[in-house]
Amino acid sequence: MSSSVHTTTDRRPLSGAAVGTLVEFYDFAVYALVVPIIAVAFFPPGDAGAAVLASLAVYGVAFVARPLGGIVFGRLGDRLGRRRVLTLVLTLIGLSTALIGLLPTYGQIGLLAPVLLVVLRLLQGLSAGGEVTSATSFALEHAPPGRRSSWITIVIAMSAVASVIGLLVVLGVAALLTEEQFTTWGWRIPFLIALPLSLIGLWIRLRTEESPEFERAREARDLSRTPLRDALQQHGTAVWYAVALSATSALSFYYLVGYFPTFLQLTAGLSRIQALTANGAALVVFVVALCAAGVAGDRVGRRPMIRWGSVLLAVVAVPAFLLASSGSVAGALAGQVLLAAALGVFGGGSYTALLEVFPTRTRLSGAALGYNIGYAVLGGTAPLLAATLVTVTGFVAAPGMYLAVVALLALVGVWGIPETRPAGTVGHDAIEPAR
């Protein structure tokens, strides 16, 4: 009996981090799934292509707020604890996403509609800026020895599972309604579902306990009063590694969840059902690949996974887009699966390493800053830039060429990252303080 209770208690932090992240990114992903409808509902009629680009730009707006969210919630997490931040960010994104489902359209209130949409997307971005590094740090600091990477990849995988769930919800609602009903008001339902989902996530997170590493640091009075400044001054190299690793992951991931659903419909000519189904299947592959790579990362180390993953991303990027643009469901699936598998390998080392290179006292501030800069610069711009590259060049694989270059630059930029797997329970000695 005691063994069973102990096992349940040990796994509760992982469940809290993972389920909360799932709810958080369900909310964040739903917008990307209905971009063509958002374009019609919230922007002036006339030029459909311009409206889609505008809605993709609003998608990227949330990423502008992510670094600020990382700074604010990172400091709170390093000063007050990881658990408090996890409840705050989930509350914020639940409310902001549900409000998107209640917004009047352009036809009802004119230009105020896209303005309000931008405000709510900024609030989503603030929340997302604090979510990932808080949840993964919480899991990392609770993880059993030798299973840190496995736990982290499970948490990160929930962001893709969230997209799959969002897909199923969108497809389910669309199947129950006529096309006119779905485009007129049915698209709002997935956004409104965010509120009860957030309440479930909050209930799970409130049943967890604070990170033992943070508690030990607090008891030893080893908490930093200025964690962001200390991270920049003492661990500047680590911040750079976090930026480079996160930027590569962000570009790849948001191609999958933010761009491909629209690309497959508007460029490859697939129907909404075909595009979303192929995208959902590829995301399932990503989840499996990432979790398997997390186990491998615990065995062979973080650095080999990062290097192998970078090379794979560079190799498959262009073929992935060529296959996806073939006009067939099989090609769409094959192209996305290539990209998903390569990203999974890369993530098997990168997501854990970008946390372990920081000590407990500055982990959230340093990792959140680097992570969110990477995601703001390359993740938030990924859908819009990809669409622009295709439009300007007329070459459907131009976004893949861009990804290949980024992956190779990342390989060079983080070549010297230390292997953090053999380190003890924290990354205090992983990197020399920046001079």
Image: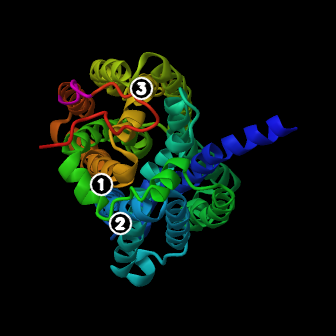
Residue 72 is labelled as 2
Residue 421 is labelled as 3
Quarter holding residue 433: top left
Disc 2 element: helix
153 shown above or below 208: above
Q: Nearer the viewer, residue 435 or 48?
A: 435
What residue type is disc 2 on?
Val
What residue type is disc 1 on?
Gly
403 shown above or below 54: above
State whether residue 162 appears in this view.
yes
Marks 2,1: beta carbons within 8 A? no
Q: Residues within 10 Å of mark 3 (few under 14, many from 20)?
A: many
Q: How many marks?
A: 3
Is 111 magenta? The answer is: no
Cα separation, mark 2 vs mark 3, equals: 29 Å
State whether residue 282 appears in this view.
no
Secondary structure mostly seen in magenta is loop
Which-is-in-front pick, marks 2 and 3? 3
Q: Residues within 10 Å of mark 2 (few under 14, many from 20)?
A: many
Quarter holding residue 392: top left
Which-is-in-front pick, marks 1 and 3? 3
Residue 346 image position (x, y, % from top left):
38, 26
Q: Nearer the viewer, residue 130 or 211?
A: 211
Disc 1 element: helix
Residue 245 is labelled as none
Disc 3 element: loop
Along the horizontal axis of the image, is 111 left or right of 214?
left
Q: Residue at x 21, y 52 (%)?
A: 232
Residue 49 is labelled as 1
Q: Residue at x 32, y 57 (%)?
A: 63
